Image (cartoon, helix red, strand yellow):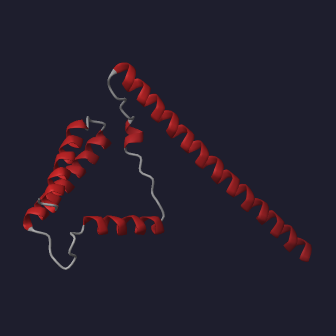
């Protein structure tokens, strides 16, 4: 009986080792592919003067992180979007700008999912973000 248990424990340990090696190999391959894609896109932009469009399947790709990672991400976003004084409510002007920004971002995601050009929407989001920064820090 103890032979079966020890065999199982050895098998389990080998599986854990293989899993760790596979995880590391996949992460390395993923980084290599992204680096190569970025290099090709940069070379294409330099040679032809325009940027490559992502295929729709890649444009809508979303990596779903685990709940722990997601919780950390939302915590960071909340702290960044809050004004300097947390007890104070944002002004109606800031609230309106933030609402416009959220609407523009949702339009951008919809355009990406549909495979439509996103440059005008990205520009609009950039302008709204600038407006938001200026409204947060008046000088």
Q: Position of residue 21 (x, y in %)?
A: 70, 53
| Residue in the picture at 85% in, 74% down | 5
User: What number of labels is visible?
Assistant: 0
Assign the C terminus to one quadrant of the image. bottom left
Q: Position of residue 130 (x, y in %)?
A: 18, 50
Kindly tell me whether residue 1 is visible in this rendering.
Answer: no
Seen in the image, is 87 located left or right of residue 50? left
Horizontal side of 65 relative to 6 (left or right) equals left
On the image, which quarter does residue 52 sit in? top left
**99 is higher (above) or lower (below) than 43:** below
Location of the N terminus by quadrant is bottom right
Give coordinates of residue 112: x percent, y percent.
30, 42
46 lies above or below 89: above
61 or 129: nearer the viewer: 129
Who's the residue at 64% across and 51% down the image? 24
| Image-based side of 127 in relation to 62, left or right | left
What residue is rendered at 39% in x and 19% in y? 47
Taking 76 as reference, is 85 above or below it? below
Specify the quadrant of the image occupied by residue 119.
Answer: top left
Can you name the residue that lies furthest to the front here? 139
User: In front: 54, or 92?
Assistant: 92
Residue extending furthest toward the bottom: 87
Q: Residue at x 45, y 53 (%)?
A: 63
Residue 105 spot, x, y in % from top left: 24, 51
């Amino acid at each position: 009986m103890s032979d079966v248990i020890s065999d199982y424990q050895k098998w389990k340990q080998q599986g854990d080792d293989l899993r760790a090696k596979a995880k590391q190999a996949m992460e390395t391959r993923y980084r290599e592919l992204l680096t190569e894609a970025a290099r090709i896109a940069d070379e294409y932009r330099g040679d032809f003067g325009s940027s490559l469009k992502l295929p729709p399947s890649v444009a809508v790709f979303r990596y779903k992180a685990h709940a722990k990672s997601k919780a950390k991400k939302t915590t960071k976003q909340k702290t960044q979007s809050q004004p300097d004084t947390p007890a104070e409510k944002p002004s109606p002007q800031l609230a309106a700008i933030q609402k416009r920004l959220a609407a523009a971002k949702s339009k951008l995601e919809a355009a990406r999912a549909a495979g439509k050009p996103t440059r005008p929407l990205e520009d609009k989001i950039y302008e709204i973000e600038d407006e938001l920064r200026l409204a947060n820090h008046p000088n």
